[in-house]
Image: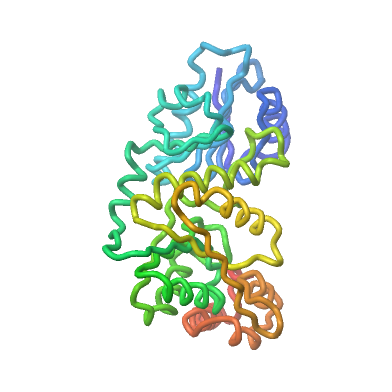
Amino acid sequence: MYMVTGAPMQGTMLERLKAFLRTCDLDYDESIRFTAALMADDEIIATASLDGSSVKCVAVSPAHQGEDLAAQIMTAVFVQAAQQGLNHLMLYTKPHNQYLFQGFGFHPVIRTADCLLMENRRGGLSDFLSRIPASVQSPVGCIVAHCNPFTLGHRYLIETAASECAHVYVFILSEDRGMFSPDERMRMAREACQDILNVSFHPTGPYMVSSSTFPSYFIKDKVRVCDVHCDLDIRLFGERIAPALGITRRYVGTEPGCAVTERYNRRMRELLPHFGVSLIEVERKASGGSPISASRVRQLLSAGRTDELALLLPNAALELIQSNRHAAGGITDKLL
């Protein structure tokens, strides 16, 4: 036996990997950035992959079960993660795989009937929440947003929540997959709202994920992927995060132009009350007859129509974009 790796796999080896995963009732996740495959007689017999700090697509050939191949392939992934400085790993899997991955140092965070979230840090979520100061007054509100970039629409949603709550937690997605980095998005939000005193800003860490990072490779009914993701995310928020911070209200903007987000909002309306949390939907702030959205801003940036941004963005976001333009002699590649 020998090991083959790719960052990620390409060409013929990628096609062979996809075919092998199909024999194990898994799909290849296109966001994978590193794969280790254990080979025997020029055939894949076990594999595991990394997408950032998420372990994905772990599979062992049914013909080689009981040969301790999972340990070998997981070790290869752990070594790669360590080389990248990734010491906090996450794993989504089917609930019946819990004991398998516990043997590799993973601990359950939250589970639903369809999905289990695990991490290789015991008490990781509790430690994450303990670093966030709890509000001593109520009611307490919460907003979870990408802010890619932070717009006047985000500002309006935060203003509304802050006017109705003693304190508002704003969680900004930590994933680094958008036009703006997590640090840039956090900086824009804090600077744009520094006059709103009962608001605090925090990264989501790996505990409030977006649909773009939720893995679906082990879910056969692709029509249900959105609901499976929603149910896991909402249960984690309602069962673990909201009680720890005393959150009783979650604020969202209406989503007339995004069917996926509207579906998520609808699911929150149904499920959050079971955890003692109300969903408050706020009509989106509009400009020029259209709702202000980060996607609209990104479209203008890609088209070079920066003169139209002043009506959509606070000064903090405008200044960041302007500084990026000057630094690169125009809109940076990162912003396109």
In this rendering, the answer to whether 297 lies above or below 62 is below
Quadrant the N terminus occupies:
top right
User: Where residue 282 sits in the image (x, y, percent)?
Assistant: 57, 70
In this rendering, the answer to whether 194 lies above or below 224 is below
Residue occupying the point 55% across, 76% down: 151
In this rendering, the answer to whether 315 lies above or below 277 is below
Task: Using the image as rendered, state which of residue 232 and residue 239 is in the foreground.
Answer: 239
To which quarter of the image does residue 149 belong? bottom right
Residue occupying the point 49% across, 85% down: 315
User: Where residue 273 sits in the image (x, y, percent)?
Assistant: 50, 51
Is 327 situated left or right of 122 in this image? right
In this rendering, the answer to whether 198 lies above or below 101 is below
User: Where residue 92 sits in the image (x, y, percent)?
Assistant: 52, 37
Residue occupying the point 66% across, 36% down: 28
User: Where residue 308 sits in the image (x, y, percent)?
Assistant: 65, 86
To which quarter of the image does residue 87 belong? top left
